[in-house]
Amino acid sequence: ETMPKKGGKGKGKKEAKGEEGVELTDAEKTAKANLRIEALERELVQRTDIMNRSIAAHNEMRQRQAELMQDFDKEKTDTFAITADMTRQYKAMQEELLKRLNVLESTIQEQKDQLELARQANEDLRRGKDQELANKDAQIADLKQKMEDMAIEFGDMLKDTLDKMSEKIEATSSEWDKDTGVDVQKKLDDFNIGSMTT
């Protein structure tokens, strides 16, 4: 009956010993526990700091997103204003040219009527009127050509302006997408966020 008791005492002493087989005193056990607590507290402080920096980075990203959206809205408004202004200018020039064209056409028609009446009286006058008529026709053709050239030029200018604005908007959108994707993940990686989940 005494043998099992000795075995039991030996097992109890082994559990009270340290890693090197030396029995730890209560003070050593307390010191070891305090060291463990301090290590856990430091780890908690470190993780808290990482979390705070992550929150700050997230808030900065949201602020950047808001700024990009404001820039995007401003670019869109500016594009609309520029397009509207160019359209107004084009319409004004077109109306002016149409007025001049109508005046010239009316003049030509009147001169045609006068020429027909004068042809019977004087052949020389007819030739002069024919020449004047030809000049007016040339002016009309020139004005029509200028209108067509102006319309083509305006179309090219408008397309170029819209293309440039679209490229600028796409660049802003791409920068926002980049900042909200890869850069944020990089910032999270820099802050060792992954270690908090392990």
Image (cartoon, rainbow, N blue to C red):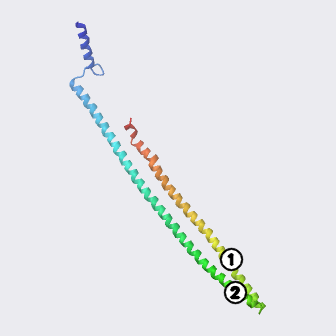
Q: Quadrant of residue 144?
A: bottom right
Query: What SS does tag 1 mark?
Result: helix
Q: CA distance from mark 1 to mark 2?
A: 17 Å
Q: Is residue 93 above or below residue 168?
A: below
Q: Is residue 102 above or below residue 34?
A: below
Q: Is residue 125 left or right of residue 168?
A: right
- In the rendered image, the residue lying farthest to the bottom is 121
Query: What SS does tag 2 mark?
Result: helix
Q: Which residue is mark 2?
A: 111
- Picture mark count: 2
At 51% across and 58% down in the image, what residue appears? 168
- Residue 120 in picture, x, y percent from top left: 77, 91
Q: Quadrant of residue 98?
A: bottom right
- Residue 190 in picture, x, y percent from top left: 41, 43
The image quadrant where one finds the N terminus is top left
Q: Is residue 87 left or right of residue 31?
A: right
Q: Is residue 22 visible?
A: no
Q: Is residue 38 left or right of residue 142?
A: left
Going by the numbered disc 1, the residue's amino acid type is Ala
Q: Is residue 74 left or right of residue 13?
A: right
- Residue 171 in picture, x, y percent from top left: 50, 55
Going by the numbered disc 2, the residue's amino acid type is Gln
The circle on residue 141 is 1
Q: Is residue 17 above or below residue 110?
A: above
